[in-house]
Amino acid sequence: MIYYNKTTQETLDAHQVSMNGLSTEGVRSRQQQYGFNELQEGKRKTIVQLFFEQFKDFLVIILLIAAIISGFLGEFESTIVILVVVILNAILGTVQHLKAEKSLDSLKAMAAPIAKVLRNGQVVEIPSREVVVGDILQLDAGDFISADGRVLQSYSLQINESSLTGESLPIEKMTDAINEDEVGIGDQKNMVFSGTFVTNGRGTILVTSIGMQTEIGKIANLLDSAKEKKTPLQVSLDHFGKRLAFAIIVICIVIFALDLFRGRELVDSFMFAVSLAVAAIPEALSSIVTIVLAFGTQKMAKENAIVRKLHAVESLGGISVICSDKTGTLTQNKMTVQKVYIDKREIPHNELELNNELQNKLLVMSLLCNDSVTADEKEIGDPTEVALVNFGKVYGLDELVVRAQFKRIGEVPFDSNRKLMSTVNQFGDKTYMITKGAVDVLLSRIIKIETSNGIVEATEQQFEQIRNANQSLSEQGLRILAFAYKELSPKQQIDMNDEQDFVFVGLVAMMDPPRNESKQAVADCISAGIKPVMITGDHKITAAAIAKQIGILNDPSEAIEGREIEKLTDEQLKAKVENISVYARVSPEHKIRIVKAWQEKGNIVAMTGDGVNDGPALKQADIGVAMGITGTEVAKDASSMILTDDNFSTIVKAVSNGRSIYNNIKNSIKFLLSGNTGAILVVLFATLFALPAPFAPVHLLFINLLTDSLPAIAIGLEPHNKKVMKDSPRNIKEPLLNKSFTTQVGLEGLLIAAVTVIAFQIGLSTGDSVIASTMAFATLCLSRLFHGFSCRSKESIFKIGLFTNKTTWLAFIMGAILLHVVLLVPALMDIFEVAVLTGMQLMTIYGLAFLSFAIIQLCKLIFIRK
Ligand code: ATP
């Protein structure tokens, strides 16, 4: 219903004037006054807090205790070394954390909800958290409401208040003026509340409270829901890490006991066991995932895909079905009118005659039942309607002039469920309702047809002619709108129940060409083992024609309509789903059933959406993808990824990025685990054969806390390899640490251990155990640095390119410099318990470390090719 009255307009005008003068400072002080930032952002950790958090780690605490104990026992050097290493490790951790946090923050800012406010006399989009009391908000279907406010205008404005009241049925909102006249309207009907959303219609509100002062601010703690949860991979890695830590601690206790038994000093044995635990327990696993995800999502954002939920990146690599909207995602959403069907005739778009009354009427109707405008080469509004405005311009009709002449006094806005839009316009002393919409929907509401001979009763034969025209235009991939009207009694208000008993005028057919990238993106999907599916509100034949052009559909039998889905049970749909590539005239409820059917067949499904009712389907999908440009705030909120360019090919790129990011995480973890395995195997070997300790505690701390973290991050930043799209989707249920992964970790760890043991034995042959442990330490450290190159990919480094990841070189060089500083600077040699090595011994270390790298590369060349 239309609740528009003068009183409201006056209020609106008055506020418009006051808002024109609202300064930036004024806005800020009001934000602080109402505590909105506090509600939205929560408390930030300072750098100092973050730094101290690095010491909360269980192993670091044990190290600190060990440092204190050795200090008490007079071993000040050990205390200082441990402290230095732990502090350096904490600095590194803080810097990485801050960097990751910064990337995630910029992602969050990009995905922040927006509000449409009246500022300086114009409607502008601003981040919702910048809304202040006194602002006038414009609300459209699909908008989230970011403040409490009083309704100033309502055009069938309906709000879903379930977040506040639990009631899922939408509530119709009205202005005060009508409120007084209506019977039975509660006192909340003229108010809208923050945290609720618009399901239908439009309106304007005057903001009365924001942030903590709103109803939801008073009752809800939004901060909890805003916390980022750990991703499934992080959870499973934490779980794995804990089990591994337990096993390692048991080993360390055994080694500690054996050392004591062999007469080693208590402090030395204790320090050694603690260091071994630190060296072997991969405590950095979960944080490596965060860092790699943070940098990976940053890259994805630059490529137009904003990830809202980190776990989505893990699932992206497993996607096997992408269900995509047609209009604007696979097509350009740049519509141009091509043909008109009127009075039983198809007429090309530029051959209409203005002095033909019927043709003239269709043109005027297409400008009146229309909210879009074009001015100064700018096109504002729904592309379907912009096409109609441009169509009018071809014949010298200006939409604003026509609209000023035949004033709009009412409307029922378009919604894609109803597939209709209606306006009420004043033609002199007569009032007409003009309706446009999907042909099949509008035809069922037609009782008369206007022809050049006047208005006649509609016959079945005439309907058949219109349907045939619709069919033949649709087969050309054109999108068709039907136009109809009826006379109303003066000042009659309308709602959707009035959309019937119309006089049919004609059809307008428009072209929305596929995006240039769509065909290639569809082909990429198919070669990556992903099934692309088109789901659209458009007509089946139009959809099938476009789907065929871009390679989604091969045979017309692969297209079905929403109403056919309704006749199928869930089981029947599941049996059929793999053979359907195009779903037309689909409603949001159908979308959920389609997603579920694919999921029940064991698929990981991505689903796009933009409308207010798409929320449940977006949530049901493994990856809900919202449109950044045309999508409603509700759709964005329900999604795990937002496309800033609404482009299907961006989803395919995101899948490719998701696959690469997952591989990078896997490779980083492999690097950490295989290096740790190498270290522990060497220690076990020495213990088993009653040899002297191969490493001093400080060696293990040095490698594990400093030199190892550099390549681990560098591997995570490996540039994305296009070849990932040649593989099939990853089986998401398969654990990362599967048999083949753990075998590789074990074998590579064994190789690193072998070269280290050789270096150790060569050192022992000199008769000096310090030279031996220095050689073992240097070989372990350097071979792990070399191993960083090998872990970049399952393929040989020569295939992926030696210099394609410069950060791995940086990590290697920095690690090697650190090692050489310790080996060569006399002042540090004592602290790090290393001996002076001869040139030959150094060369032996380099040779052995390189040997482990060369063997792995050779194996890759031989086996990966096979
Ligand atoms: P997709 O789901 O691929 O984005 P779509 O944009 O074609 O598809 P809707 O916007 O739901 O889907 O439109 C469904 C139908 O409603 C269209 O086929 C058209 O007939 C009709 N329609 C679209 N826009 C309007 C409008 N502004 N006014 C009236 N009818 C419209």
Image (spheres, grey):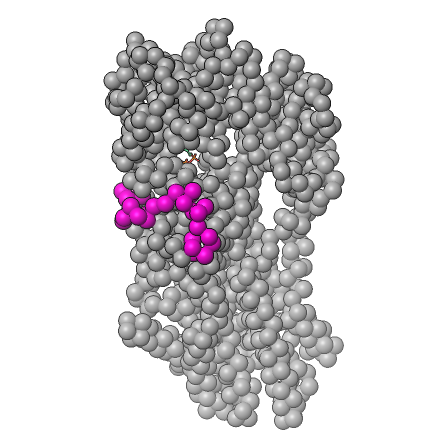
Q: Residue at x 48, y 71 (%)?
A: 737
Nearer to the camera, 661 or 179: 179
Quadrant for the C terminus in the image: bottom left
Q: Residue at x 41, y 24 (%)?
A: 446
Q: Residue at x 42, y 75 (%)?
A: 740
x and y, in percent, of residue 357 in the image: 33, 11
Q: Is residue 571 magenta?
A: yes
x and y, in percent, of residue 108 in the image: 55, 45
Nearer to the camera, 703 or 30: 30
Image check: 812 left or right of 396?
A: right
Above-or-below relation of 431 to 771: above
Which segment did they paint magenta?
Answer: 547-574
Image check: 648 left or right of 781?
A: left
Above-or-below relation of 457 to 299: above
The answer to which image quadrant residue 319 occupies is bottom left
**Res. 332 in view:** yes
x and y, in percent, of residue 229 in the image: 60, 56
Nearer to the camera, 418 or 222: 418
The answer to which image quadrant residue 53 occupies is bottom right
Quadrant for the N terminus in the image: top right
x and y, in percent, of residue 564 in the image: 41, 45
Image check: 166 left or right of 331?
A: right
Image check: 240 left or right of 750?
A: right
Q: Residue furthest top?
A: 429
**Res. 92 in view:** no
Report the magenta stretch's main SS: helix
Q: Is residue 44 magenta?
A: no
Q: Residue at x 43, y 83 (%)?
A: 754
